């Protein structure tokens, strides 16, 4: 009858190992997403279509990881009947892996556009894109560190750090519209660049959401609803030069 | 000892009621998302800033419903320790509500841009936007019906029906670039319209994903990985008119 009230030590250990394995799977997926963002941006800036094609191909790995994580979570829910913090970790892992899949998708989309852009005349500087990508990668790495180390304070830092990403995006938005107005031959390239900038901005948003999910998984409470948010391009009006 | 192996009837009934309540909550959220898409598009076409502002305000209701659904799911997981199809329904409900929240976000974003556009000179016809919105709404309704009636076949129909949405989007993409090239004064408005079209296209994608999640919740297997997909705008090159 003892077996009914106490859990054998090896079961507990293997459950802990399962949860650790889950954290590792999500962190690996995060690392892959980070790399996709870095490589998509490098491909854009260096006009490297080969690298861009590699990013497009590698997206299938991220999709597969999401399916693996979800299947593993459903198994854990069914077999372990987890409670409290463990349950939050499992639910959080599913949501985080879904957000990482979206990030992977945006990176692949940016890479596809980078291939088209390599065949068009270059316009302006792409520094803004590099800065956005670097910030987003740092935040993504911070969110994954917070998850692996159960560190809610680190997650909160990332959550509050999206504003510079939005500011760079707003700058790029205006810059691209100005290029279009100056010369209609810029319009196709500037449009693709606008969408890439929007992809990076969305990746930044998803990273903020991930930080929020990590906070919830670790602490069990939610962050205030309104985070710092500064994408003003949605109401931007840029006028063509006079004459 | 009988109480340990058989479950009292009232517990089972209340569990079934819980699952039905969950389906209803998700369906209500779906209905709200549908309405947001319809109203955002109507606000755009009719240049109705009041309606657009209402859409922006109403988004908070969708966000609240997502939080309610997630909290309810976590409680069901912890208290009911569901297995097999029930577990899939609960996991599916969390994922679907997240996708609906994204759809609400895209509708709000479109409404914000509709407010700006009402202050700019109109360009071209907005028929394409109306057609896209109508198709997306029908699909969203179909996916919610499939969920409420446990109807995998209906979900599969929706899953296969996103192609026309992508085709209209590709047409709008080229049309907007042409407007920009014809007259630089169109550039700001055409850019906002491009992003609204992209929002509708993303809403269509999320709807397809929801259909996939409904299929999984009902049947337990997943659909083939590559669904019909026809957004070719990602590699579109539009040339300005000669001379």
Image: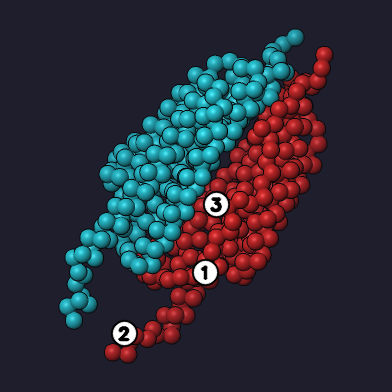
Chain colours: A cyan, B red
Chain containing mark 3: B
Chain containing mark 2: B
Indicate the secondary structure of the residue bearing disc 1.
Answer: helix
| Residue displayed at 43% across by 83% down | B10
Q: In the rendered structure, are the residues bearing label 3 and label 2 in contact, judged by CB atoms less than 8 Å apart?
A: no
Give B206 or A221, whichever is nearer the viewer.
B206
Callouts 3 and 2 on one subunit: yes
Q: Is A242 above or below relative to B61?
A: above
**Residue A204 percent across, percent down from the top left:** 47, 35
Say which residue label 2 marks. Answer: B4
Callouts 2 and 1 on one subunit: yes
Mark sitting on residue B99: 3
Mark sitting on residue B21: 1
Q: Is B23 above or below relative to B190?
A: below
| Residue displayed at 30% across by 57% down | A18
- Judge the density around disc 3: few (<14), some (14-19), many (≥20) Cα neighbours within 10 Å: many
* Alpha-carbon span between mark 3 and mark 2: 40 Å
Give A94 or A181, whichever is nearer the viewer.
A94
Q: In the rendered structure, are the residues bearing label 3 and label 1 in contact, judged by CB atoms less than 8 Å apart?
A: no
**Residue at far bottom of view:** B2
* Alpha-carbon span between mark 3 and mark 1: 19 Å
């Amino acid at each position: 009858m003892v077996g009914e009230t106490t859990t054998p030590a090896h079961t507990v250990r293997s459950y802990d190992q399962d949860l650790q394995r889950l954290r590792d799977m999500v962190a690996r997926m995060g690392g892959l997403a980070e790399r996709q963002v870095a490589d998509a941006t490098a491909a854009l800036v260096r006009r490297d279509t080969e690298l861009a094609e590699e990013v497009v191909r590698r997206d299938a790995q991220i999709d597969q990881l999401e399916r693996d994580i979800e299947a593993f979570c459903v198994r854990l829910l069914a077999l372990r009947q987890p409670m409290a913090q463990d349950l939050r970790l499992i639910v959080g892992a599913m949501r985080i892996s879904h957000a990482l899949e979206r990030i992977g998708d945006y990176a692949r989309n940016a890479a596809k556009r980078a291939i088209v852009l390599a065949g068009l005349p270059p316009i302006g500087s792409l520094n803004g894109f590099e800065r956005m990508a670097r910030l987003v990668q740092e935040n993504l790495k911070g969110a994954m560190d917070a998850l692996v180390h159960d560190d809610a304070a680190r997650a909160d830092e990332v959550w509050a750090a999206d504003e510079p990403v939005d500011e760079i995006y707003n700058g790029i938005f205006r810059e691209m519209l100005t290029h279009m107005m100056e010369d209609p031959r810029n319009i196709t390239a500037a449009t693709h660049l606008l969408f890439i900038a929007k992809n990076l901005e969305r990746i930044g948003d998803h990273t903020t959401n991930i930080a929020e999910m990590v906070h919830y998984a670790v602490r069990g409470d939610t962050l205030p609803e309104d985070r710092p948010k500064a994408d003003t391009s949605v109401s931007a009006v840029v006028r063509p030069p006079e004459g």
